[in-house]
Amino acid sequence: MKLAPTQSPVLTQPVLTQEEAFARIRLLRSPSIGPVSYAQLLRRFGAAASALEGLPDLGKRGRLQYAPVPAAKIEAEINAVRKARAIGSTFRSNIPTCCANWKARRRS
């Protein structure tokens, strides 16, 4: 793909649906799936959801066990990140107050 000097390859990527993004995270986090396997599976199946469905069959052919990571595990990780962000935003919003209190205590 030849890009114009001002064109970014990131901007030319299609926008993912939430379902496809979730399926891609599951595929990436699945045991024995690294970046190369991930890219090959997406090329072969066209979508992460299809690749997840095909994982067990691929393992049978090569005598390996490929199983997608459970969706509940990814959901728990996403919820943990959201919770951490909420805590972080609360902390960041209190920084000016904390700094002012700290400076006041330091002066006395």
Image (tube, helix red, strand yellow):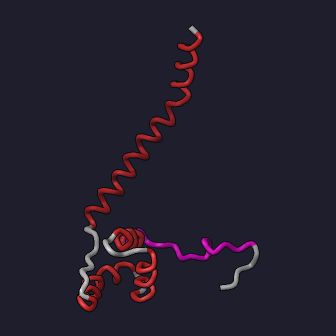
Q: Residue furthest front?
A: 63
**Residue drawn 53% across and 13% down?**
105
Q: Which residues are magenta?
A: 6-19
Number of numbered discs present?
0
Q: Quick check: 94 above or below 41?
A: above
Residue positioned most to the top: 108
Q: Residue at x 45, y 75 (%)?
A: 35
Q: Is 108 located above or below residue 4 in the figure?
A: above
Q: Quadrant of the N terminus?
A: bottom right
The answer to if 96 sits in the magenta stretch is no
Q: Eyeballing the image, is 65 above or below 22? A: below
Query: In this image, 58 relative to 17: left or right?
Result: left
The answer to if 10 sits in the magenta stretch is yes
In percent of width and height, residue 19 lies at 37, 71
Q: What residue is rendered at 34% in x and 51% in y?
A: 80
Q: Main secondary structure of the magenta part?
A: loop
Q: Position of residue 55 (x, y in %)?
A: 29, 82
Q: Which quadrant is the C terminus positioned in?
A: top right
Q: Nearer the viewer, residue 42 or 17?
A: 42
Point 70% across, 74% down: residue? 7
Instruction: Say left or right for 59 vs 92.
Output: left
Residue 74 in which image quadrant: bottom left
